[in-house]
Amino acid sequence: MSMRELSALENNLGYKFKNIKFLETGVTHSSFANETKEHVAYNERQEFLGDAVLSIIVSDYLFEHYTKLPEGELTKLRASLVCEKSLCGFSQELEMGSFLRLGHGEELMGGRERPSILADAFEAVLAAIYLDGGIEPATKLVLRFVVKALEHVENAAFKDYKTMLQEIIQKNPEERLTYALVGESGPDHDKRFEVDVMLNSNVIGHGIGKSKKSAEQLAAKEALELMGE
């Protein structure tokens, strides 16, 4: 693989390697190594390490940000984020398939689009970043995808509390319901939004979420709970 190709993958990852061999190994499938006469390192060992790195990063994030969820729910949530389907999606966003080193037979069988190969490659490349730069850049890469994935999970899980609250308030036409963004914090890859929902000028609910939409829904949920709904 040329340095130009590896440089393009570095750009996609948002990380510059000190030792590019880690990245080269991360994108090398065993089928490529098996067809090469010279000894070539392939990515299965790095995949093993990447799996553990991914688990601790995701676990730490969920532990810190979902303080009210019990262990069983945290486990299910983590499983949805580190499953093959999710990791394959992360790889596809990075265009990882086009950088893989595959054997001829695997190439002909569509290995560049195979979910298991893409998922394994994500873990192996994550390990490459960890080995080269430590936990901080590895965490930055993981959260780039996980925070967005969690937003989708949250939105899918929500009942439409805003609509429920609006339907109740509409019974009194003189009442006015509004939402106001009252706080925003965190780096770009891990934003937190705080929203108040107000009935006329009185705050009746407060919500904190990873998007304005989820914060508004949580504010409406709190308002409904205070109203006994």
Image (cartoon, rainbow, N blue to C red):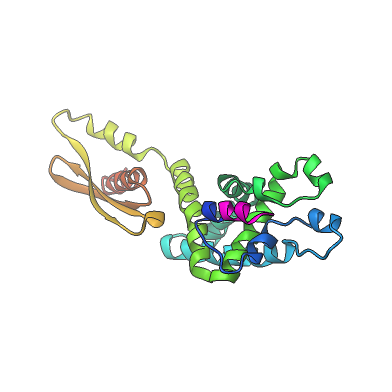
**In the image, is residue 28 above or below residue 48?**
above
The N terminus appears in which quarter of the rendering? bottom right
| Residue ID at (37%, 54%) | 188
Q: Is residue 67 visible?
A: no
Q: Is residue 58 visible?
A: yes
Say left or right for 55 vs 143: right
Closer to the camera in the image, 85 or 5: 5
Say left or right for 37 vs 135: right
| Residue ID at (46%, 53%) | 147
Closer to the camera in the image, 15 or 216: 15
Examine the image and state in which quarter residue 10 appears. bottom right
Which residues are drawn in magenta? 1-9
Closer to the camera in the image, 120 or 110: 110
| Residue ID at (69%, 51%) | 100
Residue 45 place in picture, x, y as percent = 72, 66
Residue 78 place in picture, x, y as percent = 56, 57
> Quick check: is 128 in the magenta stretch?
no
Main SS, magenta residues: helix
Residue 119 place in picture, x, y as percent = 66, 52
The C terminus appears in which quarter of the rendering? top left
**In the image, is residue 157 above or below residue 168?**
below
**In the image, is residue 34 above or below residue 133?**
above
